[in-house]
Image: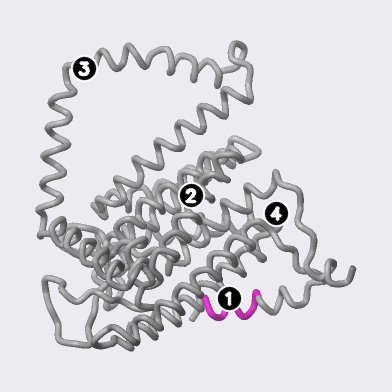
Amino acid sequence: MLLIIWLGIATLRQTLLPSISVNLALSRVVTFWVVLLLALCAGMIVGLAREPFHYYTGILHDLFAYTLIFALACMFSLDLGGPARRRTVIWRVVAFGAVSMFLQIASGYGLFPMPGVDPWFYDRLSGWSLDPNQLGFFAMFLMFLAAHLAETADTPREALAALVCAVPAAVAGVLSKSDTFLVALMAAGSVFLVLKSTTWLQNYEMAPTVRGTIVAIGLLSLPLAAASVAPFWAAALERIEQRSEEVYAQGGQGELRFHLWQEAYEKGLESGMIGYGPGPHLTSKSWKRPPPYKFEAHNTSLDLFTQGGIVAMAAFVWLCVSTLREGWRSRLPALSAMIMGVAVFSMFHFVVRHPNFWFAIVLCLLEADRVRPPFRSIRSEVAS
């Protein structure tokens, strides 16, 4: 309801402006959703003709969710177009997010109880989310937004304030014990370190600067560090393998996920790689229910493959890869890392319906758009 109210207010504000400027984020968002709409329409035709039964509740859910998210993504692109407005909104998101995370942690330890809310899923903190993985996704999102504010801060005090706001999110992410959060953090952290190091090397002279000296010492020490830990590699790999097996076997989640992914792949092929339209389409989950119940694969690419076929899946991959490329080319370490993180989450969850995913995509594209020539206004083009 709050998203819909904000959408109405933002739409009214945009209609009162003298012009609407097309930017890189808006063009990418509209392109993706137009392609996805066409793919879903084709899939819906195939699904109505070939599927033995239909889960209309799931279909209507996706139709409403896609419509809302498309409108939100477009309005994000327009509303955050100005750099000053964009930075103000990021600060608000990070500040309110830090307060939210702190209250959820306090709620977990009984310091801020919420009526009707169980903040724990066994020994994993879920806070006010439906499950711990959602809390981990939000925590990672806030951490890299705060990192972006810190690295673009004008003063050390502003950078310190941004980093302090990231602390509750980091603590909540650890308490969620989300395996996806840890994997996403490692992948995103690798992108951040590599891009940050290359940015320092390209923008600063090596010798007289502290940044250049740090990068140079780090690069020169890599062979020595690798040699020093060589005796422990075997033990480390064994521990990683053991931990991976434990995670895979825990509650049968590894077997279940691969089973879902295999069925999603087979469903997509059965549809002629056209898909079956919006809604879930898997039927052979471990806890079966009678028709019309169906399930999702919990993998964004595969879920889109079952809905809109190869076209929908390719559109999603293109959106993520092109956004990461724009962030990399524009030397945006924190935002590029955030895109890598949400891409990792997309491998285990259906993120394309999540507002945070689109906020991250739009923000990275808008920041990258600063180094591009400005697009002409729609209304000015019509007038000319």
The circle drawn on residue 6 is 1
**Residue 6 is covered by the magenta coloring:** yes
The amino acid type found where label 4 is placed reads Ala
| SS type, badge 4 | helix
| SS type, badge 1 | helix
Which residue is labeled 2 in the image?
321
Which residue reaches farthest front?
272
Q: Main secondary structure of the magenta part?
A: helix
Q: CA distance from mark 4 to mark 1?
A: 19 Å
Is tag 4's residue or tag 3's residue first in the polypeptide sequence? Answer: 4
Magenta extent: 2-10
Image vertical order of residue 281 relative to residue 101, above or below: below
Q: CA distance from mark 3 to mark 1?
A: 55 Å
Residue 137: image x %, image y %?
A: 37, 57
Is tag 2's residue or tag 1's residue first in the polypeptide sequence? Answer: 1
The answer to which quarter of the image holds residue 281 is: bottom left
Q: Are marks 4 and 1 in contact (CB under 8 Å)?
A: no
Apparent side of residue 365 relative to residue 225 in the rendered image (left or right): right
The circle drawn on residue 230 is 3
The amino acid type found where label 1 is placed reads Trp
Which residue is labeled 4 in the image?
84
